[in-house]
Amino acid sequence: MQQREIVVSGIRSTGFLHLGNYFGAIRQYLHMQHTHVCYFFVADYHSLTTHQDPTQLRANVYRVLAEYLACGLNPDKAALYVQSDLPETAELYLLLNMLAYKGELEKVPTFKEKIRGKHEGINAGLLTYPVLMAADILIHRATKVPVGKDQEPHLEMARNLASRFNQKFGFLFPEPVAFSESGELLKVPSLDGKGKMSKSENEMATIYLADSDDLIRKKIARAKTDAGPQAPNSPKSPEIENLFLLLKLVSAPETVAYFEQAYDNCTIRYGELKQQLADDMINLVRPIRERAAELQKDIETLKKIRKTGAEKACASAQQTLQLARSMMGIRYDE
Ligand code: TRP
């Protein structure tokens, strides 16, 4: 029998999960948990690179865990854990830092973006964010990492570190790739046509899994449109393109085809499109929101799931770390 491939992915506990997290990552976790060996975690250490409020971390971590479960992740299928519950990751991070060059870390686009305009308060954790992410992945020697498009540079760094380690110390790590079932990594656009949906910025242009029905309607109603197609089969403006992209994610293919046709023959009414989009988003979000709220009332159960997940993850992590240490020469008991 062919061995099942190993999958790792995580989401930072910096705020509320949104449709970008859902479509970029979680929807794929849901399929892969049945076909792969899966490790899905809450990246609490990563959240400390930018969000350091000790009074919020616990609730944020348990909320992400509850939202994972509410979306349909099954703790009997995948290992669901919290990053800091796996100390092996932190140790591998330390070892990998010896192989990461300052120059290449400074060139990572997400780092450049985060420090843009900043002259102080740039911590080393932010610079080495991709090294920690590589440790998350390599600690399980995973090959596939389901993530959104924005994470591609981090995966490149993980591959570089893996191959550098292998060259220097012998083969240990397969090179992981960013994975998307559709073959194309996804970027879920924000509702204002500026960039992507985000956990901590641009709240009125992002649909969160915890948003009420009314709030979803309000956000969609405020989304920008244009004056409408002026001639049959015109190209779409970026704002309208985004609305269609969202429609394709949440609505039935017939619904998308109906509005495409209405656009092409200039009979489209954006009000109707928005109404439909809001209805379909609510259909997706409401059951997740309600289940997640229930789950968050029962911290004891979440705690158990977290601990069991860490135990499962620990077995694979210890094995990798032991090998990495030994291959680097940290083997003084021999
Ligand atoms: N950087 C990812 C994000 O912002 C979160 C993350 C941390 C991650 N470690 C990971 C994703 C390992 C995949 C694998 O969404």
Image: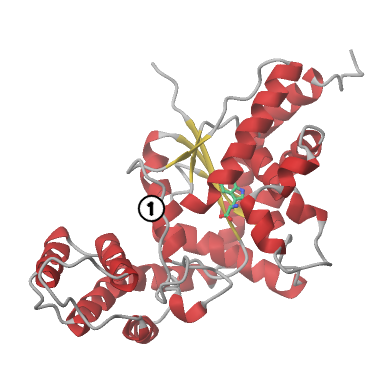
Dividing the image into 4 quarters, which one contains the C terminus?
A: top right
Q: Which residue is more in the foreground, 56 or 309?
A: 56
**Within 10 Å of the Cα at label 1, are there few (<14), some (14-19), or many (20+) other Cα atoms?**
some
Residue 186 visible in the current orientation? yes
Q: Callout 1: helix, strand or loop?
A: helix
Q: Is residue 101 above or below residue 304?
A: above
Residue 207 spot, x, y in % from top left: 42, 73
On the image, which quarter does residue 251 sit in? bottom left
Asked if 8 appears above or below 188 in the picture, the reply is above
Which percent across, then down, holds residue 58? 68, 67
Whole-percent x, y for residue 225 in the image = 30, 80
What's under tag 1, amino acid-wise? Answer: Arg
| Residue found at x 81% / y 67% | 119
Q: Is mark 1 within 8 Å of ligand 1?
A: no
Q: Quadrant of the N terminus?
A: top left
Determine if residue 148 is in view.
no
- Which residue occupies 40% across, 52% down? 186
Q: Identify the residue under disc 1.
A: 27
Side of 14 where 106 appears, left or right:
right
Residue 238: image location, x then y, percent: 34, 69
